[in-house]
Amino acid sequence: MHIPKHYFHDKTVLALLILNSILVLSVVLFILLHIDPSKGSTPIVQYRSNLGIDTFKPGSVNEFRLMALFAALQYVFSWILSIRLYVHRRHLSIALLSLTTFVLVLTSVVGDALLR
């Protein structure tokens, strides 16, 4: 894969890449450090109002591991797409990195809400 010459010289791109790197590291570490595999189940991950008494469903440890994997894959794929878009449209590349920041923040908020 060819990386454009000016991609890593762009201050906006570098700032967003550093911010996304910090966010993905914090999300993955937060999720992986707060799950307890000895319990076998984690806090509530589903609400089903049509089930009556059993409206809240606990999740498994693997569901939260997949959430951490989602954050990492989101980061990697957005970085690859950003590099490929940068040659054609710089502003779309920056918009993609900005949306990745937003998705990573939402992932951390949802992970925090489910694990606390």
Image: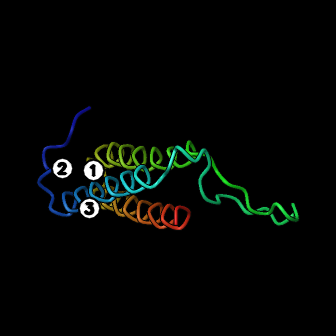
Residue 11: mark in rendering: none
Mark 3 — residue?
19
Work out whether residue 64 or residue 106 is closer to the camera in this orientation and state it.
64
Locate residue 71, reporting x and y percent. 43, 50
Per the model, the C-alpha gap separating discs 3 and 1 is 18 Å
Mark 2 vs 1: CB contact within 8 A: yes
Give the amino acid at mark 1: Tyr
Per the model, the C-alpha gap separating discs 2 and 1 is 7 Å
Relative to 102, does residue 34 appear above or below in the rendering? above
Per the model, the C-alpha gap separating discs 2 and 3 is 16 Å
Q: In the picture, residue 80 is in which quadrant? A: top left
Residue 86: mark in rendering: 1
Q: Which residue does the image show at 73% across and 63% down from the upper left?
A: 47
Residue 7: mark in rendering: 2
Q: Secondary structure at mark 1?
A: helix
Callout in the foreground (3, 1): 3
N-term mark: 2 or 1: 2
Taking 112 as reference, is 48 left or right? right
Locate residue 33, reporting x and y percent. 40, 52
